[in-house]
Image: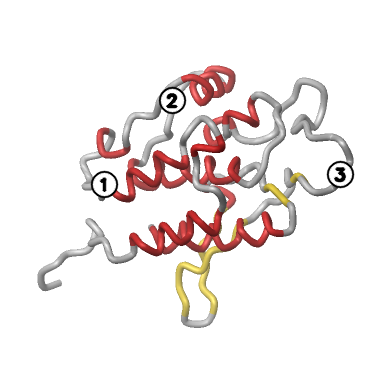
Amino acid sequence: MIHILRQVCDSLEEAHAAGLVHRDIKPANIHLGQVGLRHDFVKVLDFGLVKSVTAGDGDESLASAAGVTPGTPAYMAPEMAHEQAVDGRADLYSLGCVAYFLLTGRLVFEAETAIQMIVKHLQEVPVPPSARTENPVPRALESLVLACLAKRPEDRPAGAAELGRALDGLESIPHPERSEGPV
């Protein structure tokens, strides 16, 4: 899982360095494939909602039409729901939602409607992943996921490269899905 998240960070760092914010990071937009003999090669797809934050066009709103906020509510950063100016940290929030889903098999917040979902992203504190799964979740990974899910962008990792470096540091953590004994 960390290997996959790390590659998404690489893709996001490339986009962010070019002044682009994806705005719709979710499992459906993360494709795992094979390149040569390399398995689990990640491609971030669907840049249809990408927003240039360096265009200088004066339009910092994320609304594609009056009152319509683009993106997927289950993975939407709070600042997107407020239609505030965003930077790459909005994508990191969404990636935190993806990581949460990968760890638990559940969304960060569950709701009956898109509006209820957005309100929960704006107001509620996420339950730690370890409390929502029977699988062991390394504390350092859980802390990193929860940092990505901070409501305020300034409380999240500063960028995809920083998040990637933090994930690199977690590669040495034993993976619960791997047996330490004979296979």
Which residue is at the front of the view, 32 or 120? Answer: 120
Front-most of residues 52 and 165: 165
Q: Quadrant of residue 75?
A: top right
Asked whether 173 or 136 is in front, the reply is 173
| Cα gap from disc 3 to disc 1, whole angstroms | 41 Å
Q: Residue at x 56, y 36 (%)?
A: 153
CB under 8 Å between callouts 3 and 1? Answer: no
Do labels 2 and 3 touch, CB within 8 Å? no
Q: Nearer the viewer, mark 1 or mark 2?
A: 1
Residue 166 badge: none
Query: Which residue in the structure is indicated by mark 2?
Result: 110
Residue flagged by tag 1: what amino acid is it?
A: Arg
**Residue 119 in the image, given as x and y percentages of width and height:** 54, 19
Label 1 sits on residue: 139
Q: In this view, which residue lies farthest toward the bottom? A: 36
Element at label 2? loop
Mark 2 → mark 3, Cα distance in angstroms:
37 Å
- Report the amino acid beneath label 2: Glu
Query: Which residue is drawn at the image coordinates 70% and 29% (left, top)?
Result: 84
Q: Which residue is mark 3?
A: 56
Where is residue 96 shown, x and y percent of the image? 46, 43
Q: Residues within 10 Å of mark 3 (few under 14, many from 20)?
A: few
Badge 1 marks a residue whose secondary structure is helix
Up/down of 17 relative to 94, above or below: below
- In the picture, the quarter occupied by the N terminus is bottom left
Amino acid residing under circle 3: Gly
Whichever of callouts 3 and 1 sits on the residue coming sooner in the sequence is: 3
Picture residue at 44% right of the left edge, 21% below the top: 124
